[in-house]
Image (cartoon, helix red, strand yellow):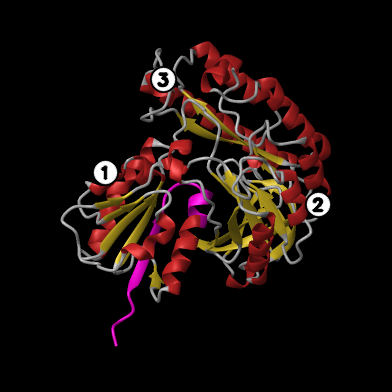
């Protein structure tokens, strides 16, 4: 009897990519393959790529080399956003055998009849207009948290973004499928579900193959809130113009949805927001933050921001810095602008020098540290529920409160995927809450 073929996966990029990798991995399992860690020997290595940042592009070659080091004869497959945007570029990388685009990646096992190494990478990539159907996905890797895909693609035309070119039009899973997937996840004793997509606030568009909204994101939130067996539901990134008051109020009243929002801003300058073709001005963003804090005073609010966009002057940047400094937000994800092919921004004048971009990024990352520290300090004296994860990091196990305060305690495998009531009391040096079960309190480090 032939030995079972082994397959390893490596995922770059966002939560959505992780959910899709898990779905692709399940298709391999259904075909009789054994999944192994990417660092182990495998017959096939699948790399799910990202193209949001320049760094993600550059990492691809080193990941291919790692696969070749594990097994020089392994069949290497590239899928994902970078594979859709620049398939030939990936196919030309030494060691790559197959590149699959946006519609082909979910049929990957159909392309694996012959695992003989190719002299040249073979490409099967659609025109992005053909990516008009929906494939549901969810991931669970550490038994603690699952990423549940509810939406894909984007109809927005932000001038810096390649995602519509990589993933196609906005389209959604049906409410029935999302609920069924949520119940499957709950049945696996996974405590937390993170809702993910490209533009999840646009949920409902394309739900039944049409462009209208048969349901809204608010409808979905209400339905998920009724599913039994889920300890926590967390909303991933959602556009400020699509985060409605009613949704915030449902979260505030929910026993399942946690008080944590991640709301992209990108710039605190209305002039730059217009150049980016964002669908809001800074005044709306202030309104969203104030509404969240009005009904959920202890909510954690994360912010995406881009520095160094073409035309961003020092005054524009300081406008963004001061705007964020004054806002009651909890942390930042800072992205240094990088030129992406086939975007409007890549053709704009007044390019910001890279050393200036780097300086501005460093300043905002420093502000993020300050904001997170202030948020943690505001939580001193409160009691929270901590969900512990599965990784042993230098002798500690980590977890998060419902409002995203990070906690650690000395490693104990019995704590994995369990929720414990914790009182937050002190702050130490490294920015993480340290919990001592013997003393029954947490120290915010």
What SS does tag 3 mark? Answer: helix
Residue that lies at the very extreme toward the front in this rendered image:
210
Look at 42% across and 41% down and name the residue there. 128
Mark before the other along the chain sequence, 3 or 2: 2
Horizontally, residue 360 falls left or right of residue 146, namely: left
Mark before the other along the chain sequence, 1 or 3: 1
Look at 41% across and 60% down and name the residue there. 107
Between residues 424 and 53, which one lies in front from this camera angle? 53
At which x and y percent is residue 237? 61, 41
At which x and y percent is residue 8? 37, 65
Between residues 361 and 369, which one lies in front from this camera angle? 361
Can you say which quadrant of the picture contains the N terminus?
A: bottom left
Look at 82% across and 34% down and name the residue there. 294
The reply to whether residue 296 is in sight is no
Horizontally, residue 71 falls left or right of residue 398, namely: left
Disc marking residue 356: 3
Is residue 9 a member of the stretch shown in magenta?
yes
> Which of the 4 quarters of the picture holds residue 387?
bottom right
Disc marking residue 222: none
Please give the residue where the numbered disc 1 appears in the rendered image: 88
Mark before the other along the chain sequence, 1 or 2: 1
Look at 73% across and 56% down and name the residue there. 224
What SS does tag 1 mark? Answer: helix
Is residue 408 a member of the stretch shown in magenta?
no
At which x and y percent is residue 295? 83, 38
Point out the stretch of residues depicted in magenta: 1-19
Disc marking residue 254: 2
**Circle 3: is it few (<14), some (14-19), or many (20+) Cα within 10 Å?**
few
What SS does tag 2 mark? Answer: loop
Which is in the foreground here, disc 1 or disc 3?
A: 1
């Amino acid at each position: 009897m032939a030995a079972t073929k082994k397959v390893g996966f490596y995922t770059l990029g966002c939560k959505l990519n992780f959910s899709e990798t898990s779905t692709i991995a399940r298709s391999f399992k259904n075909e009789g393959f054994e999944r192994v860690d990417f660092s182990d020997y495998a017959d096939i290595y699948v790399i799910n790529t990202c193209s949001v940042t320049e760094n993600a592009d550059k990492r691809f070659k080193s990941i291919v080399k790692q696969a070749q080091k594990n097994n020089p004869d392994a069949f290497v497959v590239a899928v994902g956003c970078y594979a859709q945007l620049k398939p030939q570029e990936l196919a030309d990388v030494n060691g790559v055998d197959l590149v699959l685009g946006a519609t082909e990646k979910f049929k990957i096992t159909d392309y694996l009849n012959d695992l003989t190494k190719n002299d040249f990478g073979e490409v099967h990539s659609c025109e992005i207009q053909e990516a008009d159907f929906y494939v549901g996905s969810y991931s669970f890797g550490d038994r603690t948290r699952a990423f549940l895909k509810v939406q894909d693609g984007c109809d927005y035309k932000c001038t810096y973004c390649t995602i519509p070119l990589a993933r196609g039009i906005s389209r959604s899973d049906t409410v029935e499928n999302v609920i069924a997937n949520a119940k499957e996840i709950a049945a696996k004793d996974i405590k937390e579900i993170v809702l993910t997509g490209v533009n999840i606030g646009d949920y409902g568009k394309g739900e039944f193959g049409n462009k209208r909204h048969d349901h809204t994101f608010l409808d979905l939130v209400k339905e998920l809130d009724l599913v039994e067996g889920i300890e926590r539901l967390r909303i991933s990134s959602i556009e400020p113009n699509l985060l409605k008051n009613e949704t915030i109020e449902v979260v505030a009243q929910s026993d399942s949805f946690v008080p944590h929002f991640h709301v992209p801003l990108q710039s605190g300058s209305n002039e730059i927001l217009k150049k980016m073709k964002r669908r809001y001005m800074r005044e709306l963003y202030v309104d969203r933050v104030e509404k969240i804090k009005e009904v959920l005073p202890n909510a954690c609010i994360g912010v995406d921001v881009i520095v160094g966009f073409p035309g961003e002057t020092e005054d524009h940047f300081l406008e963004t810095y001061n705007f964020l400094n004054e806002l009651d937000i909890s942390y930042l994800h800072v992205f240094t602008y990088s030129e992406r092919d086939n975007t409007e921004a890549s053709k704009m004048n007044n390019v910001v020098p890279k050393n200036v971009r780097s300086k501005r990024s460093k300043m905002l990352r420093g502000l993020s540290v300050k904001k997170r520290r202030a948020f943690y300090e505001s939580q001193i004296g409160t009691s929270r529920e901590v969900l512990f994860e599965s990784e042993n990091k230098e002798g500690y196990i980590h977890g998060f409160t419902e409002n995203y305060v990070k906690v650690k305690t000395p490693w104990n495998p019995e704590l994995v995927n369990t929720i414990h009531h914790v009182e937050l009391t002190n702050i130490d040096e490294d920015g993480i809450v340290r919990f001592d079960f013997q003393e029954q309190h947490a120290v915010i480090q």
